[in-house]
Amino acid sequence: MTDSVAAVAPPTKYDRFVAEVHRLCQDNRTRAELRRGLGLPVERCNYMHRYLVPWLRDHDDQGYGDVRRAYYGVASLIAARPRSARQGEPETAAGSVWHQRPNLGTSLGHAVTKDVLKPNTAESALHLMSRQSSDAVHRGLPALIAQLTGGGITVDWAVLLKDMSWWAQDRDRIATRWLDSYFRTATGDDTNPGTDADTDLPEENER
């Protein structure tokens, strides 16, 4: 009974935000303006406010700098996807068991198995991020994500959004989960790509 309920879990606020950004990106001008925020702090994303402020006001306007930066950062990453990724990527993984959804480490693992990235490159990126502040990770993500999406690797944007929202509070735990998922995937064992550690983060209604 528990598994049946979990299998049809409703979309989280992170999934709803990702779906909204996908909708916004159907307009070329809007997509271009969202893309202008790549790697930038919120204070330099003036063209994004008109699109994201109304959603944050109604869903998650908590005033936390790191949380808002995560929303702006992920929106710009989605907008910057190459045409091939925009055409072939599903809009949401809502309904899947959350702790089994792929995180960034899983995506990097798939990139290695598909020869999109060299193992040393992927591992170095993960180890570097595990030591960095939220701001530094945001600055580095555009180039890394571009390699993934350009190589046909899927990124679960909702999971990335949640992880970046909590990075300042739970960096070590999130980084460990990414590394665990990376090595499981890169070595051929991705039966539980998210790992149970995902459930250790507070749920969306507890922030």
Image (cartoon, rainbow, N blue to C red):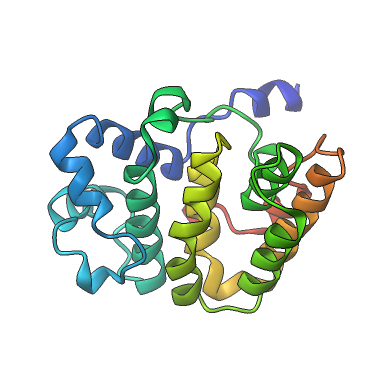
The x and y percentages for residue 130 are 66, 72
Q: Is residue 207 visible?
A: no
Which residue is nearer to you in this view: 140 or 7? 140
Q: How many marks?
A: 0
User: Up-down: is 125 above or below 78?
Assistant: below
Q: Is residue 162 above or below residue 8?
A: below
Judge by depth and name the residue closer to the eye, 192 or 3. 192
Residue 7 higher or lower than 53, as above or below = above
Tell me the residue at 62%/29% (across/down). 96
Q: Name which quarter of the figure residue 98 lies in.
A: top right
Q: Position of residue 13 (x, y in %)?
A: 42, 43
Quarter placement of the N terminus = top right
Q: Is residue 51 left or right of residue 92?
A: left
Instruction: Kindly identify the residue that appears in the image at 50 percent across and 41 percent down.
Output: 149
**Residue plotted at (66% across, 24% down):** 7
- Image coordinates of residue 72 in percent, x first then y, are 32, 58
Is residue 117 visible to the viewer in this orientation of the structure? yes
* Residue 176: image location, x then y, percent: 75, 64
Residue 107 horizontal side relative to residue 182, left or right: left
